[in-house]
Image: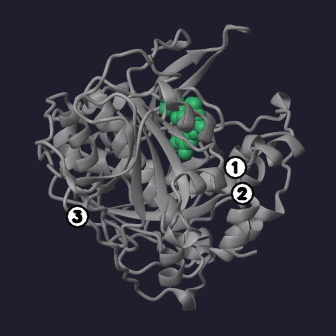
Amino acid sequence: MTWREYHEFTRHSVESLRRIPHVLDWANMPDPFRHYEGVPVLDLPGDPPAPTTPALDVLYGVSDNTPVRDGPTFLSQLLFYSAAISASKRVSSTGERYALRVNPSSGNLHPTEFHFRAQGLKDWPDGLYHYRPSSHMAEQRALGDVALKVAGNSAPIVFILTSIAWREAWKYRDRAYRYCLLDVGHAWQSLALAARAIGCESFAMGHFPDDEVAQSCHLHEDEWPMLIIGLRGSSIPVREPDGCETVWYNGQANQLSKKTIMYPSIDGIHSATKLSNLACHSISSGSATGFGEMSLPTPASSRSAFGRIVRMRRSALDFQGGTQSMSLAQLSAILAVTARPLFADFAGGDYIQLYLYVHRVDGLPQGVYRYWPQNGGLERIESGDQRVAIAGLSLGQDLAGNACVAFSMIGDLNGATSAHGDRGYRYVHFEAGAVGHRLYLAAEAFGLGATGIGAFYDEEVQGYLKLAPAQGQVVYHFAIGYPVPDPRLGA
Ligand SMILES: Cc1cc2nc3c(=O)[nH]c(=O)nc-3n(C[C@H](O)[C@H](O)[C@H](O)COP(=O)(O)O)c2cc1C
């Protein structure tokens, strides 16, 4: 299966949804928490210091540099503000509560797992760890010097983000691989921004030999490595590496559900986008340039602290609709943060173009616009009320029409796959997830709400925007506005 076949096969259409109805098997829902049982589990200190730099500044690239004393506190802070549990919701029919995390996830199914290799971290043994968000602890899967089989991984902390596709496939079936990739993009930005907020920079590698990395981390077969992220910076409390022989504890991966249903299309696209050692040469990419004739005002500012914003971030259940609008200066700031550089071996291609459906933004007539990051301007594509149209295009989800502004992210799949082969399919979705994550945090910084939308009618969106496939294809939708209260939400 090629990326193109998979993408076409997993398009939503009215016909496809009617033809293949799906009833969720709740008794077989995969556990959203992976544990590697039988290994030493290390505590991460509770209540790590909250990063106080304004979230918007962090999004623009400002780094705080208040070093913490030791490795455990550093790791605790990093993970508490990127991947930990941050709230819960109550199921009204049963009264049961379920966890929500700092990083969002399609269907709250959380296919992404966070593993990390620590080397020379003060008061923390060198080794390979898996983060256990359910108790904010680290499972020690190996002790000593773990070689990751990728070039340039000498950073004191290297994260390996993996995906468990079955978690998403349980609900989204064949289309699940798309959501896994978008989720990885969110998790990457969540980690990269938290790292920046506590004084270090990160660099993500998408281009690595999959099987070798999976073997070097002794991953359970249902976990697929997706991104490798190295963290460096003077705020990381370091010491000399131990240089010890590796001792593997491995651990027994928990079974996520009674049975796993196989989706050949997911195995097919995953194989098509894999790289072998030989294919792993260094990569570079180019980007499209253009111009928006409507310039945007000076971006609005916000002083809300990063620590508070990321822990408060939630997906809106719906938006208030009505007449309340957001300001153009807020929109200007929200768009500006999406244009800040991404630090990754596949970045630079700027594969995502943002199309806006403006419903209620002060001083900006309703309509469809394209954002051009090069000059920070908007190009008007269509005038008039878009509320019914974008809700319809987003699989009839009202929230896209009740928002102040909604988005289609158009991915340059042709460009990415000509530069990187089928692997480029992953990179476009990683970038879309990363852009989405910035939208979430920037909206929250202005007291607005946001929701990522993975469900849309692919071809209808193309048609509505009058885009030929070669001009890009829709990969993600998004909405920002005034959220309605969510009665299910608790601390
Ligand atoms: C890739 C992606 C796709 C999503 N698609 C939808 C969607 O189509 N409709 C929706 O209401 N929410 C969608 N969401 C929001 C999730 O349901 C939400 O992130 C999840 O329930 C966890 O809640 P939280 O974001 O408040 O932590 C999506 C989120 C992500 C990351």
Within 10 angstroms of label 1, few (less than 14), some, or many (20 or more) residues?
some
Q: Amino acid at mark 1?
A: Ala
Residue 258 locus on image (x, y percent): 86, 40
Q: Check the image and report above or below for 208 versus 108.
A: below
Q: Tell which tag, 1 or 2, sits nearer the viewer.
A: 2
Q: Check the image and report above or below for 452 versus 26.
A: below
Within 10 angstroms of label 3, few (less than 14), some, or many (20 or more) residues?
few
The residue positioned 26% from the left and 36% from the top of the image is: 364
Q: Quadrant where the N terminus lies?
A: bottom right
**Residue 374: which disc?**
3
Q: CA distance from mark 1 to mark 2?
A: 10 Å
Q: Amino acid at mark 2?
A: Asp
Ligand 1: image quarter: top right
Mark 1 — residue? 253
The residue positioned 64% from the left and 32% from the top of the image is: 396
Mark 2 — residue? 222
User: First in sequence: mark 2 or mark 3?
Assistant: 2
Asked if disc 1 and disc 2 are in contact, CB closer than 8 Å, the reply is: yes
Q: Which residue is nearer to you in this view: 415 or 91? A: 415
In the image, taking residue 358 as reference, residue 106 lies left or right, namely: right
